[in-house]
Amino acid sequence: MREVLLVLLGVCGTLVVGVACEQGMVWLLRPTRRCGTVTLLPVMGDVPSLERQLRWQYFCMQSHPCRRGERLLIVDCGATENTLQRAELFCRDKPGVMVCTAEQLRRIIGNDAIYKAVALVLY
């Protein structure tokens, strides 16, 4: 019984050290300044799972230290009116999240700039 407890404590300790090392590496490899990352979520047609996808993307943006300050742009690529209403409702109280068209997207990020695609989610 004592050996089993020691093994379990060893496994738990190893997991804690591993997570601490991973978080340390994330902190060490973070950009020196905020680079204004934008995550694009193109929506087209009717998307029944839109709220779940938006909640997940927003959670990832808020929970990871390297992604704080990131913007989430929901790009209307022929979405239904119902889908756009649900997206607008989600954006109301969420800073950094907005619905836009492809033309508005060009104005937001600029036509002549070079961007590094960090997270592009296609549904």
Image (cartoon, rainbow, N blue to C red):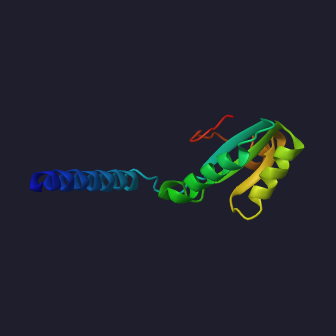
Q: Quadrant of residue 76?
A: top right
Number of numbered discs overlaid on the protein picture: 0
Image location (x, y in percent) of residue 45: 82, 35
Q: Is residue 8 shown left or right of residue 123? A: left
Identify the residue shown where x is 71% and y is 43%: 49
The extreme front residue here reads 1
Identify the residue shown where x is 73% and y is 65%: 93
The extreme bottom residue here reads 93
- Can residue 104 be seen here? The reply is no
For the residue pair 110 and 60, the one nearer the viewer reads as 60
Image location (x, y in percent) of residue 38: 64, 48
Relative vertical location of residue 56 with respect to residue 116 in this rendering, above or below: below
For the residue pair 105 and 120, the one nearer the viewer reads as 120
For the residue pair 27 and 13, the one nearer the viewer reads as 13
Q: Quadrant of the C terminus?
A: top right
Q: Is residue 66 shown left or right of residue 61? A: left
Q: Is residue 73 shown left or right of residue 4? A: right
- Can residue 31 be seen here? The reply is yes
Identify the residue shown where x is 77% and y is 62%: 92
Image location (x, y in percent) of residue 26: 39, 52
Q: Is residue 24 shown left or right of residue 3? A: right
Q: Quadrant of the N terminus?
A: bottom left
Identify the residue shown where x is 62% and y is 38%: 120
